[in-house]
Image (cartoon, helix red, strand yellow):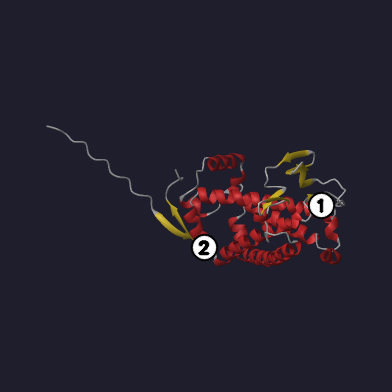
Amino acid sequence: MTISNPTPATPPAPRRRLIQRHSATVRITHWLNVLCLSVLLLSGLQIFNAHPRLYWGQYGADADHAFIAIGTERHGNALQGFFRIGSMRLETTGILGISDEGGNATARAFPAWLTVPSYHDLGAGRHWHFFFAWLFVINGLLYLAHGLWRGHFRRDFLPGAGELAPRHLWREIVDHARLRFAHGEAARGYNVLQKLSYLAVVFGLLPLMVLTGLTMSPGLDAALPFLPDLFGGRPSARTLHFITASLLVLFVFVHVAMVIASGPWNNLRWMIGGRYVITDEGFMP
């Protein structure tokens, strides 16, 4: 008599649920920020091209030593771009310092394909920059008012004491390095790394970028004379503005990479329609 082994039962598929994570106001202001910051970055590079050097303190004349500089040198018939921070100098490969315009190498800090407008026009760049800067400020104030009124920041951004424990922070860092993302109930809210980075951006980098931008306006300096002193002079404010914008670009790159790694379609559905799919699994394999 033969005894057959019973066929093992197939484990049930993880239960999937749709949840609402963000209000329409948060989603709309998020995409307006994407538009504004994109145009601000590209038009800001156009403005930077007019004087591709950054200073610290009350300096800023052409003969003064620049803290950061992007420039071009001629070696015979060839142009060579360079990028310098302090005493460290790097020769570039043609993206910085040189722009290929119509097959001709032209001295230009950032290339034509990376600026708005693409052709060299400081006035047009300033018009684009100022229009979207004020749109960004209005949109940001609306987001802040809504977040404070609805408790969005207190509920979603403030980490608990347990989340700030060194062991928990280290576990989150390791999980992110291994691309292991929370599912189930843990996916309803932000993890502690998201909370800390969003707090730093919303209440640190973005206000600093706005204030340093306002400091570079002579008209606003006349109305608010404390602004230049707050940042050690207009040249220092310009340097901080550039550094802040660079940090925001770095944040966006990391943010987009995490969106792709954790499920681009689910995240896009969430930020467009407000619905997010969670499962009862522990972590994504």
Q: Earlier in the sequence, mark 2 or mark 1?
A: 1
Please count the marks in the image. 2
Is residue 119 something one can see in this rendering? yes
Residue bearing the label numbered 1: 236
Picture layout, residue 117 above or below residue 10: below
- Nearer-the-camera pick, 153 or 107: 107
For the residues marked 2 and 1, what is the alpha-carbon distance in whole angstroms?
Answer: 39 Å
Percent x, y of residue 41? 68, 57
Q: Residue at x 57, y 41 (%)?
A: 173
Q: Nearer the viewer, residue 147 or 100?
A: 100
Residue 3 percent across, percent down from the top left: 16, 34
Q: Amino acid at mark 2?
A: Ile
Q: Nearer the viewer, residue 95 or 102?
A: 102
Furthest residue toward front: 77
Quarter of the C terminus within the rendering = top left
* Whether residue 131 is situated above or below residue 91 in the rendered picture: below
Residue 272 circle label: 2
Element under disc 1 = helix
> Is residue 162 shown left or right of residue 81?
left
Question: Where 26 falls versus 16 (above or below)?
Answer: below
